[in-house]
Each structure stands twice: as C-alpha cells, then as structure tokens.
Amino acid sequence: MFGKKRVAIVGAGLTLFRRNLKETGKELAYEASKMALDAAGMELSDIQSVVMGTAPDAFDGVHMKGEYLADGAGARNKPYVRVYVGGGTGVFTPLAGWWHVASGQFDTCLVVCEEKMSSCFPHPAYAFTTIFDNILARPLGTTLIWIFALEMHRYMHKHNIKKEQIARVAVKNKRNALDHPCAQLAANITVEDVLNSEIMCWPVQRLDISPTSDGAAALVLASEDVAKKVTDNPVWIDGVGWCIDSTIWTNRDLYYPDYVEYAARMAYKMAGIKNPPKEIDLAEPYDPFDYKELHHMEGLLLCRKGEAPKLTEEGVTARDGDLPICPSGGLLGVGNPIAAAGAMKVCEVFWQLRGEAGKRQVPGDPRTGVAQAWGDLMQYGSVIVLRR
Amino acid sequence: MSEKIKSYPGFRIKTADLREGKVPFEAWRPRVRYAWSAGIAMSRFLEELKNGRIIATYCNKCGRIMVPPRVFCEQCFKPVDGWKYVKDTGTINTYSVSFIAGDASRIKEPIIVAVIDIDGASPGMGILHKIGEINWKEVKFGMKVKAVWKPPEERVGSITDIKYFKPIREETL
C-alpha cells in the first residue's frame, strides 16, 4: 500500500444530468456536495480539505472557474485546489483527493466535480477547438469529432471490428441508464437504430456519441480512523493510477491506449491485482463514444486487445454478465457533463460495492470495482480501484 | 444512484428558452484575438511549406526522423541532431469523413480527414490533413497519397499551403 493512510469513500452525491439545467455551476456543486455530506452523516465543519474538478473554462466563459465554484464546494477558508486533466478530470479529482488524505495531511477531503456545457453557443463543441495545436491543426478547421472518428476507425481497421459490434455498447448503456434516476439519454434502442442514425463523422454516427450535459457529482473521502467512526461500510480506494502521452497524437498508433494501460498497471500494482478480469467484479470505463468503452476495456487489461467487442456480443459485459461494464448506463446513457461524468462513474462503483444501486445492482455481491476516465488530446488515463 | 436517496436536485430548462430569452439570463460575446509566434521548430517547418517542401528533424539517439519537426526529442529529452527533408507523399494510417463543421452545424460536401504517415520519416510519423480528388467511399487504409500544393504565389507559410493530399493512382506512378 502506497501512502501513509488508507483512504475510504464514505458518501456520494449526484445531481440530475440534463442538456440544460437552470442552476448555475456553483448551485449544482452545492447540491452534489450537500448530498454527499448528508450521505456520509457529516457537516461541512468535518471537512478539512476540498478538491474541485471541472473541465475547460471555455465552456462556461468563466475564467478562474475553480475559484468561482469554491463556495458551492464548501471550500471557503479551507485548503482548496482545482485540478484539470480534460476528460480525465472526473476520475483524477478523487485521485487528487486521495493523496490529500493518504499523505496524512488531512483526515477528510470533499471531492466535487461540476460541468455546465449549456452556456456555450452555438454549441460547446466549438469551445473544444481551442484544445488543438494552434499552428498545425486549427488552421485545418479540426474538430473533436474528427479526431475521435480517426481513432475509432483505426481501432476498427486494426482488429477488423464491425460497426454492428460497436453499436451494441450504445444499446447496452442506454438501456442500463433506464434504471438511473439522473439519466439524460436513457432509451430502449436497437443496433439498427444506431446504424441508421445520422452520420456525424464517419464512422461516428449520432447514437455512437454521448450528449453534452450540465451536472455535478461529489464524494466524501476520509482516513481509516474517521471512516470507521462514521460508517459501517466504507469503500476503500485501494489503487490509483494516472498517465499522459504526448500531444503529438498523429505520431502514435491510435488503435490502443498505452497510457490507459500504464495508469491501470499503476493502480493494479498498488491494489495487488494480478489478474484483472478475474479479480475485478465490475468496471466503469469512460464511454463518451461507444467504441471508447471497448478501447478502454482493453487498455484496462480486462480482456485481450481486440477482444472487447466479442465479450460485448456474448453478453459478458451486461449488468448480469460475468464482467458488468458501465452498469450505470455510462456517459452514453446517463450523460456527459465532462468532469461530473467521470465522478459519476466513481459514485456508481461506490454504490454498487455498498449494495445500494437498487435496480442497477449487479449480482454476485461485488467486492472490487474499477472506474476510469480519459481525456485531453486522446492522451490521458486516470484509473481508480475501489474495494469494500 | 443510491437507493437510499429518494430525489435528485436539478431543474431542467429548455435550451431554446434560454436562447430566446424566455428564462432570466445574461449573455456575453468575447472580443479578443490571438497571434502565436510559431516557435523555433514550426517556423522553419512553415517556411519550408512555403517552398513546397516538408522538413523533419532527427534524433541520433533514438534514430527517429520526426514529422512534425521539434527542436528537442521528447523521448530522449535532448536537442535534436539536425534537419532533413522528407517526401510530400505518404500512406493513409487512418481516416474519417466529417459531415459537420466545428460548431456542429451540418455541411453539404463531406470533408475527408486523415492521419498520413509521411514517406522518408520514421514509421508511424503522421500528420493530420485532408484528402481530396476522391469520393469518400473509395478511400482505403494504406492508400498512397501525395500533397497538392497551392501555387507558390498563394503560399503564406501555413499548413494550408498544402490544399490536401490526393491518391496516387497507378497511372500516375
């Protein structure tokens, strides 16, 4: 075990995910934070440190967004930091909360993730154009969906994967989301619906993509001493990993995310996991696009390279399968308020391991779960291993 | 969502209502511009594009010939050892076909986008560019392509001095 102290999650909170919420980002952060504190049976005065995760300032048009959101995260007059690693933020923020407590510096840390994408007109996709290389990529009119379509196509080509196989992920996750009370795009759809949906950027079609969303999520982290006082069923953060590759993404083979594998290996080593598919009971890999769930299952070493589509076809990744993947409904079904979406996955694993997931509960009394997020220029992986 | 929690906060509004001012709101349009110096490596690269050539840098330690060029090798973390012209031909590593613009609006003529591994550089050294003079349904992985340059008088030292890459058809070989 790295770190001085074992760290537990003792409470979680989540708002609705919607295309457009009336609440400000600060108000959403408050709602999620308050719910997490209530769930932990704690007051703000019990919280010694706060970590905020939120993605590009360009969405909100509010610079110093971390500072702006601080009040909503209960951070006033407390040690506070905002962290940001693109789409990887939602899982990275709990990792940053972990080192606050594992270091021994604090006994408690409130982890809050917020995103409000609805403020940006005409579409938040345009705010993403500022992430591209300003000399080489932006003059070409590069968009986010171009580059993900390039990655998806390379992955399909390398392993001879058909779109029908990938579409099954969208069908599964949107269906799983029917049981999630916060879900934005829960639906009963078919593979044909996905294949017949509008082509955005071949091979990406409309139903391959998660929506843009507003929402917030929060977690209360505590040291072992505190955790055992406030709850009988803490969920332990037993593994953490994070890794970045170069922004020069045109120089690497996009068919496989090495950086996710490196982050996963770091987390598994810490958690003592030697055989991930056997020792992990459920996983929430990042699924902003349906192919990404498959890509990330492989990067997380949950199966061999190119094998994830087959496992999906065989039902292994269904909620009642041998290795449930995205039982929450994922970003495809619940929604994708960037930082809050990754944190929603950590919330889901927390609730699943506590047996509180209700209609979404995976069978078999799960003991170990993994959540992962992915971001920046197809280059960042953040991984967390939770155990009860 | 925990089954212990009975209701979840969040008040949904319609995006159209926000844009049409039917809910209280405030709006703002940024009025800023940016101009970036292209840097040491990219300035040379752009000047060479103006001359109709693609230039790389190489590192003698790892042996890589790198496009786009850089002044330091990020693997060996040392200065590169020199410059080297590479070809304006390459191979399609992966491609996609966009039917939407940057603001997610729909466009009529699809844009074919590709990562092109440049001939003369190390394997897998690709750049992002567009593909032209071919129907998108006929594009293939591994297809050989060649840069189509703007006329010299129209070049300004930009990646767009290459209009696009076009397939090298057998009859033109």
Image (tube, rainbow, N blue to C red):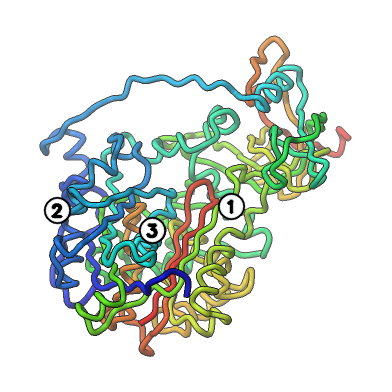
Please tell me which residue is depicted at 30% across the width and 37% down the height of the picture.
A64
Residue type at the position of mark 2 = Phe
User: Compared with residue B28, is residue A356 higher up or lower down, i.e. above or below?
Assistant: below
Camera-nearest residue between B21 and A387? A387
Q: Quarter-wise, where is residue A340 in the image?
A: bottom left
Cα–Cα span, label 2 and label 3:
30 Å
Image quarter where the C terminus of chain B lies is top right
Cα–Cα span, label 3 and label 1:
29 Å
Q: Quarter-wise, where is residue B63 in the image?
A: top right
Of tags 2 and 3, the one toward the viewer is 3
Q: Which residue is mark 2?
A: B11
Q: Which residue is mark 3?
A: A96
Residue type at the position of mark 1 = Glu
Residue type at the position of mark 3 = Ala
Residue A197 pos. (x, y %)? 44, 54
Q: Is residue A331 visible?
A: no
- Report whether A65 appears left or right of A275: left
Q: Secondary structure at mark 3?
A: helix
User: Compared with residue A186, is residue A248 higher up or lower down, i.e. above or below?
Assistant: above
- Report whether A33 appears left or right of B106: left
Q: Which mark is residue A151?
A: 1
Please tell me which residue is depicted at 50% across the width and 60% down the height of the picture.
A242
Residue B17 pos. (x, y %)? 16, 40
